Amino acid sequence: MPQLRYRSRSYRRIFKKTPGGKTVLRYKKKKPSKHICAECGKFLHGVPRGRPYEINKLSKSKKRPNRPYGGNLCPECARKVFKREARKE
């Protein structure tokens, strides 16, 4: 019987074969959902999907796009914001 914390479906069940030939059940946390644009709700490209300990291992340039509002807005919405800001003055 698995431990109580592993009985929920928040864990993925992975069958692994050991060197001895037995098949054992391993429990792994699921991947988080994809990042979405704050304005239009589209999925963001260039933002990796992973648990915080996996993301922290990446370099800064691999964590999100290197532009203003990168990782927060999609390119189309960011372009609209830039135009709005430029026309304001």
Image (cartoon, rainbow, N blue to C red):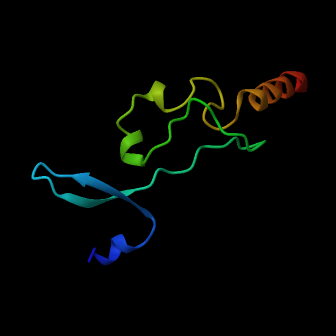
Q: Quadrant of residue 57?
A: top left
Whether 11 is drawn above or below 65: the answer is below
Left or right, 53 with respect to 32, comes to left
Number of numbered callouts drawn: 0
Residue drawn at (62%, 23%), measured in percent from left and top?
Answer: 67
Left or right, 16 with respect to 7, comes to left
Farthest-out residue, front: 21
Residue 10, image x and y in percent?
A: 45, 65
Q: Nearer the viewer, residue 80 or 26?
A: 26
Residue 21, image x and y in percent?
A: 14, 53
Left or right, 74 with respect to 60, comes to right
Left or right, 1 with respect to 45, comes to left
Farthest-out residue, left: 20
Q: Nearer the viewer, residue 57 or 16?
A: 16
Q: Nearer the viewer, residue 32 or 7?
A: 7
Residue 77, image x and y in percent?
A: 78, 32
Q: Nearer the viewer, residue 41 or 20?
A: 20
Residue 59, image x and y in percent?
A: 40, 28
Could you tell me which quadrant the N terminus lies in? bottom left
Residue drawn at (72%, 27%), measured in percent from left and top?
Answer: 75
Q: Quadrant of residue 84?
A: top right
Could you tell me which quadrant the C terminus lies in? top right
Whether 19 is drawn above or below 29: the answer is above
Residue drawn at (90%, 23%), measured in percent from left and top?
Answer: 87
